[in-house]
Amino acid sequence: MHSKALVLSTLLFSQLGQAEEALTLTFKQLTMETAVHIAQATVLSCREKGYQVTATVVDRSGTVQAAIRDSIAPPVTVTISENKARAAVNFTSVTSALPDSLANGPVGRTPGLTMSAGGVPIQAAGVTLGAVGVSGAPGGDIDESCAQAGVDSVIDDLEME
């Protein structure tokens, strides 16, 4: 009888030990320097095209890591760029690719998300690290191309990590 109890307690404790290990996660996050670099490269890309914009980089949870508003970008671009970045990271998709049914449905009216072009996820080695959102150019396609330029400025280094 004692051997059965010993086997059961050994199984129980080994399962508890395994469960403990599964209680935490390890994940990669952009450094502050990388987030600032992406935001700055994004704004400079739009500036080269003649547009004053704001670029906001969020981490994988949608929390702002860096935001840069060019000198005369309208103040409203700060909120819009943040919300575009948050939409891109939540749906792990460029915001221009989000279906109209999503943008026009209840999710599209969720506070803190802007479902229009200009948000680009930051993904490397199959992992979503965050997103960058842009607002201020005369079209979302331009916002998105600037955001993509910001991501492209670091993607090779991120893929090597």
Image (cartoon, helix red, strand yellow):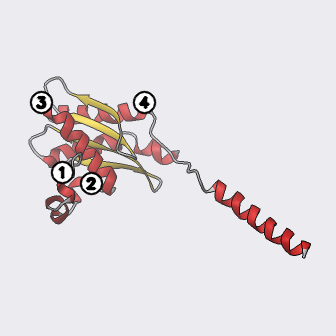
Q: Which one is earlier in the sequence, the residue at label 3 or at label 2?
A: 3
Q: Mark 1–mark 2 contact, CB under 8 Å?
A: yes
Q: Amino acid at mark 4?
A: Glu
Residue 43: horizontal and vertical position, in percent? 24, 33
Which of labels 3 and 2 is toward the front?
Answer: 3
Marks 3 and 4, how far apart at CA? 25 Å
Q: Amino acid at mark 2?
A: Val
Residue 135: horizontal and vertical position, in percent? 17, 39
Callout 4 crowding tier (Cα within 10 Å): few <14, some 14–19, many ≥20: few
Residue 6: horizontal and vertical position, in percent? 86, 68
Marks 3 and 2, how far apart at CA? 23 Å
Nearer to the camera, 13 or 64: 13
Marks 1 and 3, how far apart at CA? 18 Å
Callout 2 crowding tier (Cα within 10 Å): few <14, some 14–19, many ≥20: many
For label 1, the SS is loop
Which residue sits at x=13%, y=60%?
Answer: 104
Residue positioned most to the top:
71
- Residue that carries the numbered disc 1 in the rendered image: 117
Residue 27: horizontal and vertical position, in percent? 52, 48
For label 2, the SS is loop
Q: Which one is earlier in the sequence, the residue at label 1 or at label 3?
A: 3
Q: Mark 3–mark 2 contact, CB under 8 Å?
A: no
Q: Amino acid at mark 1?
A: Ala
Q: Which one is earlier in the sequence, the residue at label 4 or at label 1?
A: 4
- Residue that carries the numbered disc 3 in the rendered image: 74
Q: Is residue 77 above or below residue 97?
A: above
Residue positioned most to the right:
2
Q: Is residue 72 above or below residue 147?
A: above
